[in-house]
Image (spheres, rainbow, N blue to C red):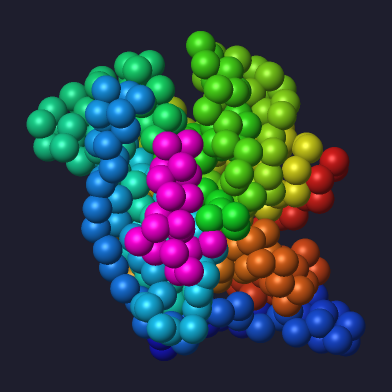
Amino acid sequence: MTRGCRSRRPPRAAAAALLLLAAGVAAAAPYKSDPGPHRVEVQLGEWADTARDGRVVRWKLYLPEAGDEAVPAPVVIWSHGAGGSRDGAEYLGRHLASWGYATFHLQHAGSDVVVLRQHGVQGMLREVRSPQVSIDRFGDVPFAVQRIAAMAQGDLAGRLDAERIGISGHSFGAITTLVAVGQSMPQVGRRFAVPELRGAFAMSPSKPRGRSLGEAFAAMSAPIFHLTGTDDGSPLGDQTVETRSAPFEAIDGVEQWLLVLDDGVHSTFSGRPVREPGKARDELGRHHEIVRMAAVAFWDLVLRGDAAAAAWLREGGLAAELSAEDGTVRHRPAGE
């Protein structure tokens, strides 16, 4: 991809870049911002969960093409927001696959585009308030992990590494993501936590309802990268950058990052066109570039143990890459 015009980095970011270079850390440059070396294959499919009355989970898989020397590929699950589908966040799935990951984009029946088309936006929002809708979509994640493990021993043997697996998601999908790595929810507690997951990439997370922050996030199990924007609202009108940053502020038992994109809106992360008044469509180009870099670096760190990714994320490389107009990033080691 061709990088657009960039404003000059602010003095603080430039100073950080110089310090990194002086320390011999090649972390100040962009991190895998261009597509990777692997050709991308796309597969469509669905699973039926006999333990849940045959509930169907449709999926879209982006993965390195067979024979492209990218195997076995670590796996990232993606969970869409309310009204979304398995087709969302293609910009992210393709990028990760080009860098050697297999990304399964799930579609959650009951809170997907089908409900949106049937009921409209307001009707969909009423539908997804049902506790059973949340329970159904939360249950899709452990089921998907089981099915992916089976595929790694079956049709995709040698192409999937089901021992290295993480989860990501947007909005309702970010809630699903945090539940999968330990967030406690009313009525179900931590029933849907999935110990196999090694990391969580949560786009537009939310302040939990129904219990305190301390109760909700007392037992998180994996590193988390949170993302939001300064204009990241909600169709319900009850979310701000402060409420979306609340999980990062409250969690202290795992390593975390919080990226806040300047002028980032809710649809930025799903890949949908920007429709908010006064927002330019071309803002998505730079925003998506930053999200792609953050994602591949995070997964390189937590799923591959890559030293360059660790340096870029922990020693100021991402902060140095951000201009004043891009946004800010904070890092918190586990226990702080």
In this rendering, does residue 249 appear at all? Answer: yes
Task: Give the percent coordinates (x, y) of residue 326.
Answer: 55, 67
Q: Is residue 292 above or below residue 75?
A: below
Residue drawn 61% across and 78% down? Answer: 31
In this rendering, does residue 14 appear at all? Answer: no
Residue drawn 24% across and 53% down? Answer: 45
The residue sitting at the right extreme is 23
Assign the C terminus to one quadrant of the image: top right
Task: Give the percent coordinates (x, y) of residue 94.
Answer: 38, 70
Task: Give the percent coordinates (x, y) of residue 73.
Answer: 51, 68
Q: Is residue 18 above or below residue 270?
A: below
Residue drawn 45% across and 57% down? Answer: 153
Q: Is residue 126 above or below residue 220?
A: above
Residue drawn 64% across and 50% down? Answer: 198
Q: Characterize the magenta stretch by its predominant secondary structure.
A: helix
Q: Is residue 70 left or right of residue 87?
A: right
In-front residue for pair 17/154: 154
Task: Give the percent coordinates (x, y) of residue 168.
Answer: 49, 50
How many numbered markers are drawn? 0
Q: Is residue 251 magenta?
A: no
In-front residue for pair 261/295: 295
Q: Is residue 152 magenta?
A: yes
